[in-house]
Image: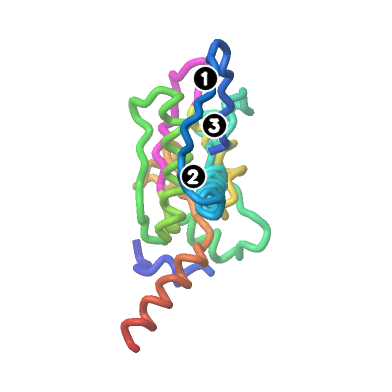
Amino acid sequence: MSTNNTDDQFDFQEEMFQLDGVKPLKQSDTVFHGSSESDLLAKKLKRQAIEKALGSYQNSLTTEPVQPIDPDDVIAFKKDGVQEGVFKNLRLGKYEINRTLSLQGMKFKEVHEKVFHFIVDNYKHGNRALLIKHGMGVHSKPHPGFYKSYINAWLRTLPEVLAFHTAIKQHGGYGAVYVLLKKNEQLKLDNREKHRSRQA
């Protein structure tokens, strides 16, 4: 890759349990002096914050049938606002690849989880240029290009993804795709604060 600094190049849902058959505890005269109301409220608010954070990263990728893509089709997408020059550089493989995910040998359920967490985790860590090797799937079932078809559908729905394009031959060609993620502005701010603290 000719570009070394990618970032400079482009600007619990809570489960509900059915407690059938659970017997209530018997009444007791024992007085228990436990946590104060303020402590209980603080714990509740903390739990809700954790659940909200986890919920925002629940796997939203569909497992329903998607539009089939032929093994030798180019897949490409960019959101409004992505500059043509940036998209061109992505298409030509000019950005340094930060992380690569290979789906070879994986079952569909694992692919579903791996792709989602690959995108989310790299966004969290500020990695912006990724490569997913999905394979062409010429002989895949139930139809050719099975995983490729899902990658094409999934990446379009993830808010972290700005653009993607089928890779050039040396990076996998029709069996791989470059993915460009948006900037993690919070991570950028955190790093800036750390830098200021070191200088103080």
Q: Do the residues labelled 3 and 1 touch (CB within 8 Å)?
A: no
Looking at the image, residue 70 sits to the left or right of residue 95; the answer is right
Q: Where does residue 113 sit, x and y in percent of width and height?
A: 45, 33
Question: Can you give x and y, in whole percent of width and height, for residue 48 in the image?
Answer: 56, 47
Residue 137 visible in image: yes
Q: Residue at x 42, y 61 (%)?
A: 126
Say whether residue 80 is magenta: no
Tell me where the magenta segment starts and ends, as one range: 131-146
Of tags 2 and 3, the one toward the viewer is 3
Q: The residue under label 1 is which amino acid type?
A: Lys
| Mark 3 vs mark 1, CA separation in Å | 53 Å
Q: At 40% across and 47% down in the image, what residue appears? A: 131
Q: In this view, does 174 lie above or below 5?
A: above
> Residue 166, labelled with which disc?
2
Q: Tell me if mark 1 has few (under 14), some (14-19) or many (20+) residues whose alpha carbon lies within 10 angstroms of its own.
A: few
Farthest residue to the right: give it: 80
Residue in view at x 54 percent, y 23 percent? 27
Q: Earlier in the sequence, mark 2 or mark 3?
A: 3
Q: What element carries label 2?
A: strand
- In the picture of the structure, the residue carrying the numbered disc 3 is 150
The amino acid marked with disc number 3 is Tyr
Report the residue at 31% width, 82% height from top: 198
**Callout 2 amino acid:** Thr
